Amino acid sequence: MSNLRFSAVKAAISRPKTAAQEFAVEKASSFFAKNVFTIAKMKDYMPKNVYQELLDVIDAGEAIDLDLAEHVSQAMKSWAISNGATHYTHWFQPLTGATAEKHDAFFEPGADGVAIEKFTAGALVQQEPDASSFPNGGIRNTFEARGYTGWDPSSPAFLYETGAGKTLCIPTVFLSYTGEALDYKAPLLKTLNALDKAAVDVANYFDKSITKVFASLGIEQEYFLVDLALYNARPDLQITGRTLFGHMAAKGQQLEDHYFGAIPERVLAFMSDLEVEALKLGIPLKTRHNEVAPSQFECAPMFEEINLAIDHNQLLMNLMEQVALRHNFKVLLHEKPYADINGSGKHNNWSLITNTGVNLLSPGKTPKNNLMFLTFFVNTIRAVYEHADLLRASIATASNDHRLGANEAPPAIISIFLGSQLNDVLDEIETARVAKKVKAETQLWHGIPKIPTLQLDNTDRNRTSPFAFTGNKFEFRAVGSSANSASPMTVLNAIVAEQLIKFKTEVDKQIKKGTKKDLALLNVVRKYIKESKAIRFEGNGYSQEWEEEAAKRGLSNIKTTPKALDVYVSEKTEDMFAELGIMSKREGEARHEILLENYYKKIQIEARVYGELVNSVIAPAAFTYQNQLIENVKGLKDLGLKGTAYNAQIDLIERISRHVNEILENAEAMRQERKKANILEDTREKAIAYDEKVKPYFDKIRYHINKVEQIVDDSKWPLPKLRELLFVR
């Protein structure tokens, strides 16, 4: 085993360097979206009248009938085959957290024995994967296999290219035979529809020309890179995505010299290659840089419509894995692959854009525009206040639990940072006295503060806040790096849609009683500012003082996943999702069950890996070195030397024994707790048992393994150390 470690290190340090310039020989504009069946490409493959009909249907958000779908399928097939595709697949996002695909060939033999290339409207619109083989929370029994994927025309088809060829990928939703959503995309699309309608209704108070509002999203993706040989020599990293143990290298991130530093040449080659492949798929990657921790990096695209942004992020994660292997790297998307340095998040930057090009979360220059901004701004704050626990649950996973609350990530307490300028504006509105009459519709009445024109950097940033306003958008920083952003964005879209509906009801009620429209708007805005004040926090979210203050304010601090997920099956949440037409009670309960299962199974896997490595790798390595020390002490005694000559070695022998005994005893105790948890039938109870009874042993075992690692002869330690994983590249 020790040979494997040093062979891995040798392989890593002898990798041939690839120049980044090899992957950027053309202007990005010349190949951007080359592998995407864009609207512009459709025009080249369709009759003019059919093309226009398709545009009209898409713009109106209407269903595409089979006749039109047949035209689209033939155009899509012609484009795909002309670009080298041999297969097609419905590309969907089941509740595994990964993407899924089943490839079918265009090739089909004809009745006369002559082969043809065939792709019909039916194949485009619908396919049938096995719904019982994906997580379904009990919606489908093992013997009830039927499920459907359905084409999502709002997200363009694309060609995914590997060494084995090209495949036409068609983004789809995934539903059970009985109609329940079994994926992340279907509920997201429903929330976008609900948000669009609710936001348009409110926006029409200010501008009747607004007929559509869409949510915009920019996703910052953090990740680690590790040499492939070193990765393959760490079974824990392979199986769980993180190092279960390992003494931290003497140098970590304490010198703050990696962040925004010069990108290592080999890493830059990977990044350049990734960008080329991403741009060909229409993913508008814009930013790349070193992150805070050693071997940690980040990439970020430009903002896109939210459904497309999430599809692109899922595709990007797949692409990162593929491209990394070409460079003998492994991408680590786990939120906390190394315990003692920063973990990785996926900051979700969310805003609302109208069909007239207005960002509803961007303050304007006129009182009217500022009131519109305030309306959507304060309603978002009120929504987060009302459903803070649900927003917390939307980012709750076993892997993100390791990151939340650490010094690089927000606490488990949901709060909102606005910056001093906007915070003062809201305080002023809350306390201002407003005249009951308005001189003219275009004028501002006395007592309403005029919001200054705000720049994108009108306020400082707060990296300790899970939900921060950053100029013309809200940044949800608590999302984990491996997550599908559809989960938190479904929740955010839904709670804002619900809040806007409530807002319009209250405003219309005041108008009906004779209150002027603008005054009615401000009255309700002021009411919401007062009601949601507790969620606003401008200080250090890492501090103990904030935890104490948050408790006084009545804000939840749910630190681990199993209990955080309870809100998914609360009456309040179920009623909201049902009223908005997003999820039925049955669908919500199924997702709750799936998330709990996913949690305890990941902890279960980690516990098993601990047990295996402790017994077959760590303890034998410690015993081997201990025996060497024992033989050495015996030799010194045989020479007649006094105890002073070998007391230090005896001390090492005793320390090894103490630590190994603790390791083995805790591993066995953990195994016994795992056995108790496994017999529990209730999924929630099982998840809590794994969290509260099994998981606490992880830190105990890790502590003693790390102590042994510091003692054992380096040449006999079997697994790559953190100093090698983090700094050999």
Image (spheres, rainbow, N blue to C red):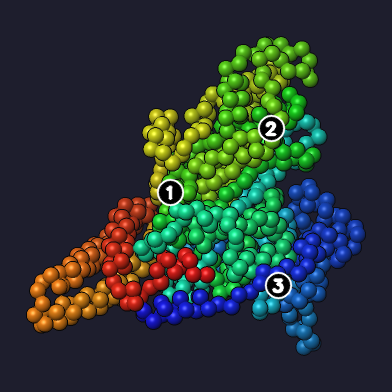
- Earlier along the polypeptide chain: callout 2 or callout 3? 3
Q: What residue is pinned by disc 1?
A: 406
Q: Which mark is residue 454?
A: 2
Q: How many marks?
A: 3
Viewer-proximal residue, 73 or 700?
A: 700
Three-letter residue code for mark 3 = Glu
Q: At 87% across and 59% down in the image, what residue appears?
A: 50
Residue 477 versus residue 289 in the image, above or below: above
Q: At 46% across and 37% down in the image, what residue appears?
A: 540
> Residue 681 lies in what quarter of the image?
bottom left
Q: At 48% across and 34% down in the image, what residue appears?
A: 539
Residue 413 versus residue 70 in the image, above or below: above
| Residue 506 seen in the current view | yes
Give the SS element for disc 1: loop
**Is 2 positioned to the left or the right of 538 in the image?**
left
Report how far apart the C-alphas of labels 1 and 2 lie in the structure. 32 Å
Report how far apart the C-alphas of labels 3 and 1 lie in the structure. 39 Å
Three-letter residue code for mark 2 = Leu
Report how far apart the C-alphas of labels 2 and 3 lie in the structure. 42 Å
Crowding at dot 3, Cα within 10 Å, few <14 / some 14-19 / many 20+, comes out as few
At which x and y percent is residue 131? 55, 64
At which x and y percent is residue 556? 42, 37
- Earlier along the polypeptide chain: callout 3 or callout 1? 3
| Residue 134 seen in the current view | no
- Earlier along the polypeptide chain: callout 1 or callout 2? 1
